[in-house]
Amino acid sequence: MKKTIQSLFALSAFGAAALFAQAQPAPKILVVDMAKLYDSHYKTEEQNNKLRGDEQKAQEELDRLNKEGNSLVEKYKELAEQANNPAKTPEAKSAAAAEAQRMMGDIQRKQTEVQTFQQNTRNSLQQRIKNFRDLMIEEISKIAVDVAKRKGATLLIDKSGPTLIGVSNIIYSDSGYDVTDEVLKEINKDRPVSVAAPVTPAAAAPAAASSSDSPKITLPGVKKP
């Protein structure tokens, strides 16, 4: 009798589980390309235009600082030549040497000023890019989720990011399950008329802050007096 009751309970539990499983909707998985949505957002283009303008201003300031520094170097060279010119009087050579020594300090301070400006500019632009990207990903994700829910999705997967071994997270997906273009229409429906279609964004590293691309103050190959 006891075994019969246990069997009935087991059968009832199995039946309930089967009914519950039948009640659950079939999973519906959609995919989206978050990188494409970010690059194609009109706000990204607006931000890129602002960054390019600020990079240009920073580059102009960097060129000005380097021009001042190189002017100091030329004056230093002249003073160094005077300090080592045998035709000059000892007094004149001594005065030139003292002035050259002072000029050397000015050059070193200008080098520090240039380096500090480059570093501060680089950090500022990179932080602005990060802050903007974080806000945009949050905004785009919300819209993508809203679209996916309207289409009855139970799971939305980003196909843009690579895995740890460098391949796409999605090896294959039916284009019919890709809602990227639909989300793109949604996020750009309020695009201002003045904003042009998005272009490929510039490299993350700010050009104005790149020490390898910028002119440098270099000390001439002369002996210090």
Image: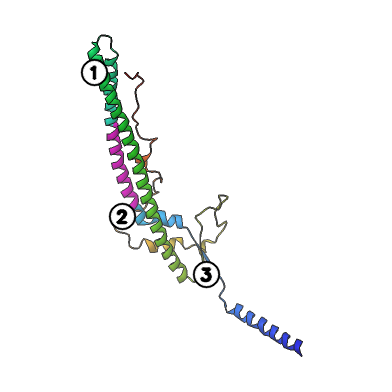
The residue that mark 3 highlights is 154
Residue 56 placed where, x, y %? 30, 42
Q: Residue at x 35, y 47 (%)?
A: 125
Dot label at residue 199: none
- Front tag of 2 and 3: 3
Q: Is residue 36 left or right of residue 92?
A: right
The span picked out in magenta is 46-66
How far apart marks 1 and 2 lie (CA) works out to 61 Å
Circle 3 crowding by C-alpha within 10 Å: few under 14, some 14–19, many from 20: few
Which amino acid type is marked by label 3? Thr
How far apart marks 2 and 3 lie (CA) works out to 35 Å
Q: Nearer the viewer, residue 97 or 214?
A: 97
How far apart marks 3 and 1 lie (CA) works out to 83 Å
Q: Residue at x 38, y 62 (%)?
A: 187
Q: Nearer the viewer, residue 117 or 165?
A: 117
The residue that mark 1 highlights is 95
Q: Nearer the viewer, residue 20 or 86?
A: 86
The residue that mark 2 highlights is 195
Q: Is residue 151 left or right of residue 102?
A: right
